[in-house]
Image (tube, rainbow, N blue to C red):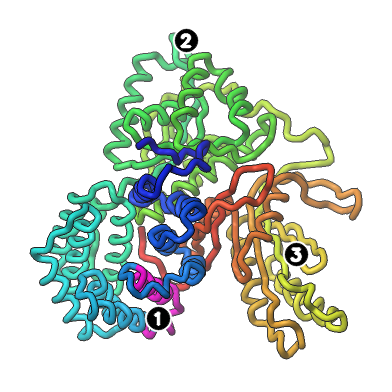
Amino acid sequence: MSDPLRETDENVVPQGIDPLRATIRTRFRRGELARAYDWCLEGLKHYPDNLWLKHRAVLCLTRSGALERAQTAYAEFRLHEAHYDAECRALGARLLKSEALEAPLSDFTIQAVRAAEAYAAIYQETCSYYPAINAASLFVLGGQIERAQPYIQAVLEQSENAEQDDREGAYYLHASRAEAFLLRGDMQRAQASLEAAIALDPDNHAARSITLRQLRLLADHLTLDLTGFQALEPPRPAHFAGHLFAVGDGDNQMTALDEEALRVRVREALKTAGVGSLYGSLAAGADILVAEAAHDLGLPFHAVLPTPSRVFFETSVRPVSSDWSRRYDACLEHAASVQEVTSDRKQVGDLHLNYASRIAMGLARIQAAALCTRPLQILLWDGQDNQADRGTAHDARLWRLSGGEQVHLDVPSRVRYRGAGNEGETADTPHFSQSLRAMLFLDVMGSSSVPDDRVPVFVDAVLGRLARACEQFAPGLVYQDSWGDGLFLAFESVARAAEAAVTLRSEFEAIDFEALDLPASLALRIGGHFGPVHEGRDPIQRRQSLFGSQVVTAARIEPMTLPGSIYVSESFAALLALEAEKAYRCEYVGRLKIDSQKQRQPIYSLRRLRRPETSN
């Protein structure tokens, strides 16, 4: 069956429940949980009572870390009522496990044991190794090692000669043995069991990532060394960048032979590093060469362009040579996805180039986190960090600052093409300038229910409290405005905006509405976005303000947000993964229709990490 899930065909549903389930399984196995979840929801429009689609949708959310949304969906789908279905019961226990892992340290032990007991109850009825291994691990994490021993023994005994009819089942059988051996401290057998599991189902990257994350959590708790397990990680996502160059016989051009030699080196580097997917631009030269090598190896590459593709073509491809023009179109055709991060109709300089490259770097890191592996950056350049504000040197420096690993393939300085990529004007009006801003829109849901006589109290005790909390974010807070029951804030960085969002939510949750005689149903919604905005004088307010489609995007995310949650755009999530991935996590929610004139947009839920994460 052909894959119907390219971005251009996102509304095409495979005919029949079996092809649909096969498509979802394929995405799920690749670790593409976001797309698998989207297709579960799309399928439920056609098969609203299908229990498998409901279960897999919640499982996608759970595995991607979207705990709150998973719990909501579990209740909305009424999966807790499916007592006859062992997988649905196990999913309920899994949600308790996820809740425990997200709990503050002071509550973790109690919640871990609670989840362990839920799994233990399922094991008593089913005698299945799956609830047994989860009960064992959670009892260990909850500090009740003795209670874990019978379940560890049961897993090893039951799995020793057991057989499974399908590859995924065979994988989990051996992966559970690996986990049981690790709980006993037998690292050699644990590694051998995981190797056996992977050999049985080598393309199930989603399952492998979950296993590795679990083993790292246990190893951290038991102070065990997992260095030998790095070779078992799923294929790594990579960001790629490099110099523009022309191919020919001129003094400042790369010869055809040298280009072919570089192509061979790129393919070998991708294979040696274990790269599984790539993210980057498609400028003439290095970018297109890497994209072509990825296609040759059957690796998906995701093009992230600073402007619409034809605009980018006119400044960063066509001027270099007509040959690159043909290859550029072929790369667009072969790309797994093409993201145009702005709607500007001309190249506007360094700001947009940096914006696109930072999003591409962040997307690679988001995918690496989902797969529980280490992201990589592949550079085709001369290695000269000239402190440029854009280009390969800028991308290399930013990636190093984030602690990322790099592979450097040399491209001589003499062949660099220096006449493209920055030919547009920065603005049509001299009184306006462009800058990158992280924006938050906040709205108090239900404020219309506030009685007229309590409006002054609402303004002072609720909006006033939020406004006073904003004062601590100066000087990073560069713009703020209010309207009715809402706030609009803009920051220099996404890390600062994320800190403000979680702080303001905590401030709101601490308000005693009963004591203030205000409706208890009041709830805060926060939407966030990061992008280039136009800064200029507002002719109505007669002061500096922010304008443009990126501001509109930020405003339209907020109404889509679940009350009490913080929803952000993919660009916000990507930049946060690049700047502050140890402090925050953005969990995939789904593709939401925030603008009637545009396609559905990937939206994430922002969370502050409450427990230290194991390293990837």
Label annotation for residue 108? 1
Name which residue lies at 48% across and 58% down.
Answer: 48
Q: Is residue 350 above or below residue 446?
A: above
Say how many tags the image has.
3
State whether residue 535 is above or below residue 164. Answer: above
459 sits left or right of 494 in the view: right
The x and y percentages for residue 507 are 66, 77
Give amino acid for label 3: Leu
Residue receiving disc 3? 487
**Residue 517 rendering spot, x and y as whole percentages:** 77, 88
Q: CA distance from mark 1 to mark 2?
A: 66 Å
Camera-near label (1 vs 2) is: 1
Indicate the secondary structure of the residue bearing disc 2: loop
Q: Earlier in the sequence, mark 1 or mark 3?
A: 1
What's the distance in space between the residues labelled 2 and 3, CA to CA?
58 Å
Q: For residue 286, which quarter of the picture?
A: top left
User: Disc 2 vs disc 3: Cβ atoms closer than 8 Å?
Assistant: no
**Residue 447: horizontal and vertical position, in percent?**
77, 73
